[in-house]
Structure formats: C-alpha cells, structure tokens
Image: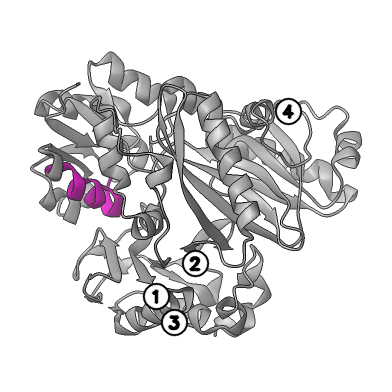
C-alpha cells in the first residue's frame, strides 16, 4: 500500500469539487489550488487547505507545473489528482509529480503519451485488433507530400485532424479536393500553435455518425474491465452537450463487441486506472471504429456511476494507493436503469454558443436525490469568467427506463433557474422535448440538423 494522506487537486471548479467529495470517504485530506480569479471559488472553500498558484491566465496558474509542485510541497501533499482538462493528459506533468516523490492519480506517463498522439494511438488500436477508421499516414509540420493521393485513398468527405489534438480541437472537415491543401496547412499551423506539434493526418468522415464511448478501468497488470457505454452524440463544435447510458437503440451484440475491443486495447497497454475508449459508429450500419482514448476521468463520468453504482474517483484513488480492488470484476458489473446528463453552460445557443461570462445573480439548482445528481463548482453570486470553460453545472437524471430518465431530466431543467448571464437551459429543454431525441435518433449532426427547432 502507498499511503495517500493528503491529495492536491490540480484543477478547479466542478471536477475539483467532485474529487473533494470522494477523498474524505477514504480518509484523505484535500488541497485545492487556485488562480487569483478563483480565490473565493467553491472548490477552495470545500478543500481542507488551499494554495494560490498565480494570475488568472491558465498558463500562469493551472498549467504552471512548477507552481503546482511547489504548492504540493508547501502543503505536504503526497498525491496529485489532475481531474480533466489542463494537465490531466500531460505526460511531462505526470513524470514531474512522480519525480517529486508523489503519487500521480492516473495512468503512467508512457500510457498518456501513447494515447495522446492520435496517430500513434490508431496504430496501437490496430495492433490490439480494434477496428479503426480508414486514415492516412502522419504529415509532419511543413510536409504535405502526396496529400491528395492519400486523401483519394481515404475517400471524401474526410477530416484533417491534429495528431496531438483532442476534444474536437484541431479537427476540420473537407468535402472536396479543392479545399484539402488549404485546410491541411491551416490545421498544421493551428496544431503547432496549440499543441507544439504541427503533425496532422486524414481520416474518413462518416456522414451520419454516433459518438459512443466505453468506460474502462485497468489494473496496471494487463487486466481491465469495462463499465459499459455512454452515447455522447449530441455535440456542438465537436464538444459534448448531452450524454446518456445505455446508448439508445444500440444492438446488444454491437455493444458487446465494442466493449470487448475497448478492454483489449486497455489490456494491451497494461493500462492503469480510469480511461475512456471512444468510437465513431455508423448510425445506419452500426459499424464502429476507434476514435481515441482519453487517459483521464471524463466530464460525463457521472452517467456511468448512476447506472453501475460505482464511484470512479474513489476507484482511481484506491488503485493509486495500491489496493487490489478484487471486488471490481466484470461479472459483478451490471447496468441498472438509464441515466442522462445535461451540461449547463454560460453561453448563448442563439448566437452560435458564444460564451457568456458574467455574474450569476440567481442560481437555483434542483436538489440532489436518488434519481438526480447535481455536480457544480459555482454558487449564486459567483462569476463565470472568460478565463475558463463556461460550464455552470451538470444535471444527471436516472430512471428505470430511458423514458423515465427523460421525464426526470425535463422536470429538473424546469426547476433550474439562472439569471445574470445567457445560458442553455431553454436549449436543453427543447432537446429533451424533441421527438427525434425522444425516439433515440441521436447522431453527431443532431444539433445542427434540428437547429431551427432548438434555438430562437
């Protein structure tokens, strides 16, 4: 056993508050870190201790490895949980934490690197027998030789994707050859600026696709289990808005094959901890292909927790301190009911989801209970700043059936009141009420296809 007595959470907002909920149940004290913009934030109030990092700019605070390590040293933390975003998938940070004599709550730096390079991850997935979308070789910065012939082999429409990208960043659609070179050059430039790596590759674009992911948990010794799937197809700008589990209308045989493929990849990498293997699914044929693997806890992890009864953050912490987790066996993991998550954002859906920072003059969220979970990192009177992601809260509703979960979500959204800033509550309510969503006809182009029904 590796004793973890004090945990520094290298993150902010909702996910920091989420980790703070699980740690004390394991006898672990918590340390929050904050920028000047977050000095009075909820996660700072809830932690046992708090330490300032620096100015509001993320590069000078939440992305500043030296400041985080200094905060850990100053407070006597012996472990670091990265949450999601910021440094969560930064192999250099994971190495620095270990080099400082602390436990990094997550996979190994090598596993983060392997899956962080999207082109390399595709190769590893193929080697593990996981189906991948037809794609091209990697084109390094400034190298676009044979680009057009590679595109012809992949087929149009296609995506130009940053090899080091993720979360929808560094991904551009090309529908015909006349657009290809210009888009590839622009994506390389953006990737170099955003990720320090200008490499791109081409990947087939499936016109009507679903985004389905498998939650996996690896034990670090070549064994892994899955905790079933989440459908994350409802997205704007390639970023998720609504997630649910089980995936509506997905044949059981397809679900089983997808889960088997995800576990095979995790086992091949001797993966340690919580991870998510994401797939693109042809909505017409149910053929599925590997998209990427996220080596961290996901924003939408509560959906899985609601249907399995498992605490994924607690499992992360227990594995990190050396517990065997013998009770976490595939045969004992079962799906109970249906869960749906809606992300409440400070943004204006009527204006292309433009972020809407400002003060939450009123924030009334429904009360959590057996069929409703509310995860948030803000209170009434707090400000949603322009410095960080504009998420206000996540509502997660459970029901014995999908119809019941939908009804519970509609009721929860009706109870929610946000004043002072633009937000997407009305937009989410219209999604829940939409006939196509109600019948489970979900796909990644849903929000754009039905935009006129959902906005205005």
Residue 246, given in percent of the width and then of the height, sits at 50, 61
Marks 1/4 in contact by CB < 8 Å: the verdict is no
Residue at the spot of label 4 = 138
Please tell me which of labels 2 and 1 falls first in the chain.
2
Residue at the spot of label 1 = 422
Residue at the spot of label 3 = 426
Q: Quadrant of residue 261?
A: top right
Residue 78, given in percent of the width and then of the height, sits at 17, 25
Residues at marks 1 and 3, CA–CA distance in whole angstroms: 10 Å
Residues at marks 2 and 3, CA–CA distance in whole angstroms: 15 Å
Provide the residue span drawn in magenta: 11-24
Q: Which mark is residue 354?
A: 2
Residue at point 18% right, 34% down? 7
Residues at marks 4 and 2, CA–CA distance in whole angstroms: 33 Å
Q: Is residue 12 magenta?
A: yes
Q: 10 Å neighbourhood of mark 4: few (<14), some, or many (≥20)? A: some
Please tell me which of labels 4 and 2 falls first in the chain.
4
Marks 2/1 in contact by CB < 8 Å: the verdict is yes
Q: Is residue 232 above or below residue 23?
A: below
Please tell me which of labels 2 and 3 falls first in the chain.
2
């Amino acid at each position: 056993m590796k004793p973890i007595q004090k945990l520094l959470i290298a993150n902010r907002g909702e996910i920091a508050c989420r980790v703070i909920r699980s740690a004390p149940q394991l006898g672990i004290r918590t340390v929050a870190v904050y920028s000047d913009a977050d000095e009075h934030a909820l996660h700072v109030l809830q932690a046992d201790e708090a330490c300032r990092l620096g100015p509001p700019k993320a590069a000078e605070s939440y992305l500043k490895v030296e400041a985080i390590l200094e905060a850990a040293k100053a407070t006597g933390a012996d472990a670091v949980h990265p949450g999601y975003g910021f440094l969560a998938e930064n192999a250099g940070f994971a190495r620095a934490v270990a080099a400082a004599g602390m436990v990094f709550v997550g996979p190994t730096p090598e596993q983060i690197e392997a899956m962080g390079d999207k082109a390399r991850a595709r190769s590893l997935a193929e080697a593990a027998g996981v189906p991948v979308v037809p794609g091209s070789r990697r084109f390094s910065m400034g190298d676009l030789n044979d680009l057009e012939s590679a595109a012809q082999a992949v087929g149009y429409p296609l995506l130009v994707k940053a090899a080091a990208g993720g979360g929808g960043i560094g991904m551009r659609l090309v529908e015909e050859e006349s657009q290809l070179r210009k888009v590839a050059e622009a994506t390389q430039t953006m990737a170099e600026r955003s990720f320090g790596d200008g490499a791109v590759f081409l990947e087939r674009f499936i016109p009507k696709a679903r985004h389905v992911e498998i939650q996996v948990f690896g034990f670090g010794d070549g064994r892994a289990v899955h905790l079933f799937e989440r459908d994350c197809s409802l997205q704007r700008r390639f970023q998720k808005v609504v997630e649910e589990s089980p995936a509506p209308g997905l044949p059981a045989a397809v679900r089983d094959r997808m889960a088997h493929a995800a576990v095979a990849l995790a086992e091949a990498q001797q993966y340690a901890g919580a991870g998510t293997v994401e797939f693109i699914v042809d909505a017409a044929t149910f053929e599925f292909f590997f998209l990427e693997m996220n080596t961290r806890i996901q924003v939408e992890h509560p959906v899985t927790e609601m249907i399995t009864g498992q605490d994924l953050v607690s499992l992360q912490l227990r594995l990190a301190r050396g517990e065997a987790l013998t009770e976490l066996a595939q045969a004992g993991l079962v799906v109970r009911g249906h869960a749906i998550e809606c992300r409440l954002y400070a943004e204006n859906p009527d204006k292309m989801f433009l972020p809407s920072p400002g003060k939450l003059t009123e924030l009334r969220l429904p009360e959590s209970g057996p069929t409703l979970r509310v995860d948030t990192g803000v209170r009434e009177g707090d400000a949603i700043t322009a410095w960080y992601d504009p998420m206000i809260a996540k509502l997660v509703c459970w029901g014995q059936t999908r119809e019941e979960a939908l009804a519970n979500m509609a009721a929860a959204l009706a109870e929610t009141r946000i004043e002072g800033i633009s937000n997407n509550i009305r937009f989410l309510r219209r999604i829940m009420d939409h006939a196509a969503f109600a019948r489970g006809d979900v796909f990644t182009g849903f929000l754009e296809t039905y935009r006129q029904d959902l906005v205005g």
